[in-house]
Amino acid sequence: MNSLFIAYSILIFPIAFFLGIIYSFFLRKVYARFQARRGPWLIVPKEVRNILGLTRIFQPLYDILKLLYKESLIPETANKKLFKSAPYIILGSIILSILFIPIVGFSPLGSFKFSLIVILYLLLIPPLLLVIGGSSSSSPWGAIGAKREVELTLIYEIIQAFAVFSVAIAANSLSILEIIEYQKNHIPFIALNPFAAIAFLLIIIGKLRIKPFDIPDAPVEVVAGPETEYSGKLLGILELGRTFFIFISITLFIDLFLGGGMHFIPSISFIIESLVILFLLALINAINPRYRLDQAFKWCLKYQIPIAIAAIVWTYILKYIIVF
C-alpha cells in the first residue's frame, strides 16, 4: 500500500504537467483556428524542421522554460517579500491539490473523506495570493487588476460552492472517489444535474480568464493586471501554476460530472472528454468580447447564480422527492 501511494504521488505530477502542456497547446491551437490564424504548428513544415523541430506541441513548455531562464526584475517600491513569495505559494497550493484529484480513478489522496473540501480550500489560495502579489508590486495596473480579481473571486466562490455541494449532497459524500463511484452506479451528474454542470463550467471559464471573463488581466486596459510587474523566473512560476491549473479544472469537471472518465477504455475516454471541454472553452473564448466588471456582475446575478440555485433545488428534488 505504501509503495503504491509513493508511486502514485511521484507519477501524478509529471502526468498532470504533461497533460497541462497538451491542454494549453490545444486551447491555443483551436482558438487560433477559430480566428483564421495558424497557431502553434502540430506538424512543422519540412523546410523549417531543422530550426523548429518536427512539432511545436510543447510550445507552452518552451515558453515556461524561456521565462525560468530569465532574470526577474522587481520594482524598487514593491513589498519584495510579498511580491516574491506569492508565485511560490500559488504554485505550491496548486501542486498540493493535485494529490486529491483522481485521474481516471487513480489518486494518492482522492479517497480522503473530505478531499472535495480540501481541494476547494487549496484552490482558493491562488487567486488570493495573486491579489496580494499584484497589490504589493506598487504598480497601478497591478492594483486595479488585483481589485478586479478579488471582486470576481468572491462571486465565483459562491457559485462554485453551490455547484460542487449539489453534487456532494446527491452522492452523500465529500470524497471525490466516492462521487465517481456513485456516478458509475447511477448516471453521470452532467445528465443527473445539468444545472450544476453548467454552473461549474461557467466558473472554469472565469477562473481560467477566458473571454468574456478575462477582466483582471485585460491587456488593452490594465496591461496584465496583477501579473504586470512579474517577469523572468517569477512569471515563469506563475505560468507553470497556470498550466497545472488548466489540468486541475478540466479533471475536476470530469470527476464531478462525467464519472471520472471511467467509460469504455478509461484513459481514452478521459482524453476525449478533456478535448471536448477544451474545444468548447476555445470556442467560447473566440466568439465573445470581454465584459466590463459591471457587465460580468450583472451576468452572474442574472444567469449564473440562478443556475447555481437551481442546481441545489434540483438536488433536493432528486434526493428527497424523486428519491433517486
Image (cartoon, rainbow, N blue to C red):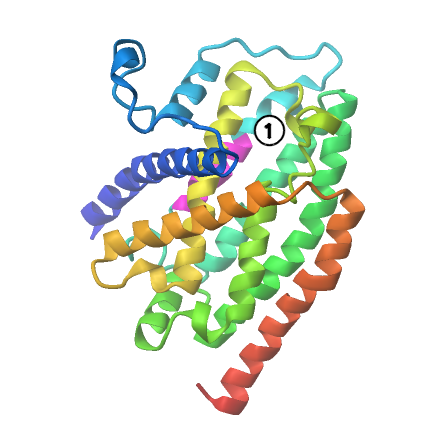
Query: Does residue 240 show up magenta in the picture?
Result: no
Q: Nearer the viewer, residue 198 or 155?
A: 198
Q: Which residue is mark 1?
A: 86
Q: Nearer the viewer, residue 220 or 74?
A: 220
Compared to 306, does 321 lie above or below? Answer: below
Numbered-mark total: 1
Q: Residues within 10 Å of mark 1 (few under 14, many from 20)?
A: many
Q: Magenta stretch: give its range.
A: 89-98
Camera sees residue 258: yes
The picture places residue 225, in percent across and down from the top left corner, at: 69, 29
Main SS class of the magenta portion in the image: helix
Q: Nearer the viewer, residue 152 or 31?
A: 31
Left or right side of 178 for 83: right
Q: Nearer the viewer, residue 196 or 179?
A: 196
Instruction: Give the image quarter of residue 198.
Output: bottom right
Left or right side of 177 for 219: right
Instruction: Give the image quarter of residue 23.
Output: top left
The picture places residue 161, in percent across and down from the top left corner, at: 60, 61
Residue lying at 49% horizontally and 25% vertically, measured from the top left: 237
Quadrant in which the C terminus appears = bottom left
Question: What element does badge 1 sit on?
Answer: helix
The picture places residue 256, in percent across and down from the top left corner, at: 43, 62
In this view, which residue lies farthest toward the front?
36
Compared to 257, does 214 lie above or below? Answer: above
Residue lying at 59% horizontally and 53% vertically, measured from the top left: 203
Left or right side of 175 for 293: right
Camera sees residue 164: no
Kind of residue at badge 1: Ala
